[in-house]
Amino acid sequence: MNLQTAEQVQKAARLIRSGRVVELGHTLEGGMPFFGTRRFDVHLKQMFMNPQANRRGSNEEIVITEIGQVGTQLDAFPHQTIGDEVYNCNKVAEISSRAGFTKMGVDAIGQVFTRGVLIDVAGLKGVRTLEDNYEITVEDLQQAIARQNVRLERGDVVLIRTGWDAHWGTDNARYVRTCPGIGVAAAEWLIRQEPIMLGSDNWPVEVAPSKTMPHASLPVHQIALVVHGVHLIENMRLNDLAQAGQSEFAFVMQPLKVKGGTGSTVAPTAIL
């Protein structure tokens, strides 16, 4: 996020031509896919009737969930570790408390307004969705970029379309069991372009399981979040954006200010 300067914001704003807003986030609901033991429960409270003569009723709900790790979500740096360390060699024990992390929580990220770029790998391959476990390579990314006649720039949010969200809400078990995504080499190549964030329409951004490191657990998470300080956005909706036919756009997103949180459910948008 240090790469989001005032000049970067102005440059992104100049990309807005038609004013069309394309939503990139899924609706939060109990029927969406969940990884592991995560959950999302909404409990509607009984309507409260205020005592005044105008009979104003009030409705509210209680939501029980891992607010940073369900739906379309942003990963903050403390979400992942290498051993007992998070980004910038901070020890988990030294920056964690019962009420959250004391450094690098999701509340410190703030408003994201920068240039966004869509890399449509599914479109490159001419398929609705890439195959299970398909590892996106550097060559795939470069070919898609050339096909779309777009370039990556310092400070971008880079979104990779796999088509995997076709299974969202229709085959949730398959959605979280495995997925296509970027491999280690592709992630390292993208990070060398100095993006602010990497996002995708699958649950971990990367291919799962890893082809390069088959005995490792989500190595791209460690490479991006722990080693290089690049945030990840998971479970995005990218089909509408791909159909719009515009590869660069103004990207807007505001994480919830959960003090010391490891992530946030988000509702990002592309403004064309």
Image (spheres, rainbow, N blue to C red):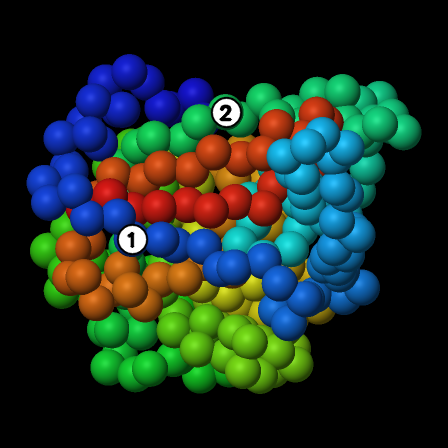
Q: Is residue 80 left or right of residue 270?
A: right
Residue at 25 percent across and 39 percent down: it is 250
Which image quarter: residue 112? top left
Residue 147 x %, y %: 13, 64
Q: Amino acid at mark 2?
A: Gly
Residue under label 1: 22
- Which image quadrant for residue 19? top left
Front tag of 1 and 2? 1
Q: Residue at x 45, y 63 (%)?
A: 201
Look at label 1 and name its amino acid.
Val
246 left or right, relative to 60: left
Query: Residue 193, can we see it?
Result: no
Query: Measured from the top left, where is residue 148 in percent x and y?
Result: 14, 60
Answer few, some or many: residues within 10 Å of disc 1's Cα (few below 14, many 20 plus, some between 14 and 19): some
Residue 79 image position (x, y, % from top left): 69, 41
Can see residue 179?
yes
> Label 2 belongs to which residue?
110
Q: Nearer the viewer, residue 187 or 181?
A: 181
With respect to residue 23, does 79 lie above or below? above
Residue 157 place in picture, x, y as percent: 35, 41
Q: Residues within 10 Å of mark 2 (few under 14, many from 20)?
A: few
In-front residue for pair 32/11: 32
